Amino acid sequence: MPSDQLQLLIAGYVLGDLDREEAETFEQLLAENPALMVEVERMQKALELAYAPAEVLPPARLRSAVLLPVQSTLTQSTLVQSTQPIATAARPKAFSWGKVMGVAAAVLLVSLGISNYRLWQTLQAVQMQRQQFEMLTYSLRATSANNPATARVVVDPNTLKANLIVSNLPPSPPGKVYVLWTVLEAGAPLTTDDKSAILTEVFQVNAQGDFAETISVPDVYRSETLITKVAVTLEDVDSPQAHVGSPILITGS
């Protein structure tokens, strides 16, 4: 049997669109060649993906666009089938072009439905990824009114790298260093000091009071809702982690 007629028989079998003689012919082919069940199962899975995707329900417009034309095609094919006489055994059964086109259209629509659904899933994933990994910016202002210093931390949550830019901060006194802290909400499930802070960077400004470098930041910047403040304090050079200084620069002030 030509391969195109065989594919149409398989499609008709899966869609339940074979008449009695065609069904008997296909069952005989299955008995002679059980490997055909692989093709039957493959097409059945394709139909299941199109009609009932397991992961996420597609938009209503996409579901209607796929199912309604298929249902209409199958209904018309069934009506045509019911009005046709059953062929006698003495006369070879010819494929109806109307049925051929109906089955082909159904298979094509199923294929297009799967492609559109996968495209919709991909777009959703891209949008979610874009929202999840957009850049975060923290602007710090001086806690003292007569201090012109400012700082900005621009974080890439994807790489956990940040640009720390400080301006107009007086050079630290001997034995002192500036420390950038990430302050979390109380009870956050992360290791912090007694002020709910994570030491993020130790730095010194130049003679003009400026500092600009790329630094590494902790994983919490991928869950930025846990962060309440970003601050800069002045600490002892030998124990910057002691966190005894008061904020000199802080977000939200």
Image (cartoon, rainbow, N blue to C red):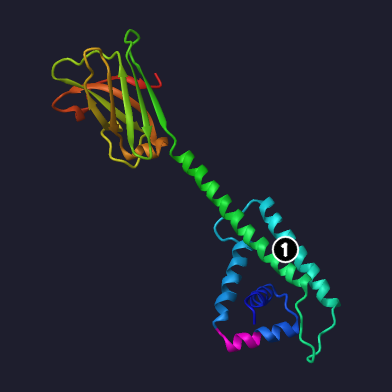
On the image, which quarter does residue 222 sit in?
top left
What x and y, as percent, mark residue 7? Answer: 64, 74
- Closer-to-camera residue (23/225): 23
What x and y, as percent, mark residue 120? Answer: 58, 50
- Closer-to-camera residue (52/195): 52
Which secondary structure type mostly characterizes the magenta part of the structure?
Answer: helix
Residue 202 as seen in the image, left or right of residue 122: left
Three-letter amino acid code of the residue under disc 1: Val
The residue at the point 73 percent across, 75 percent down is: 17
The residue at the point 21 percent across, 13 percent down is: 207
Look at the numbered disc 1 and give the secondary structure of its residue. helix
On the image, which quarter does residue 86 sit in?
bottom right
> Magenta stretch: residue 77 in it?
no
Residue farthest bottom in this picture: 90
- Closer-to-camera residue (1/29): 1
Can residue 193 be seen here? The reply is: yes
Q: Quadrant of the C terminus?
A: top left
Residue farthest top in this picture: 146
Does 72 appear above or below 218?
Answer: below
The residue at the point 22 percent across, 16 percent down is: 206
Can residue 57 be seen here? The reply is: no
Does 217 appear above or below 51?
Answer: above
Q: Which residue is mark 1?
A: 70
Does 79 appear above or below 229?
Answer: below
Residue farthest front in this picture: 2
Residue 29 as seen in the image, left or right of residue 199: right
Magenta region, residue range: 27-34
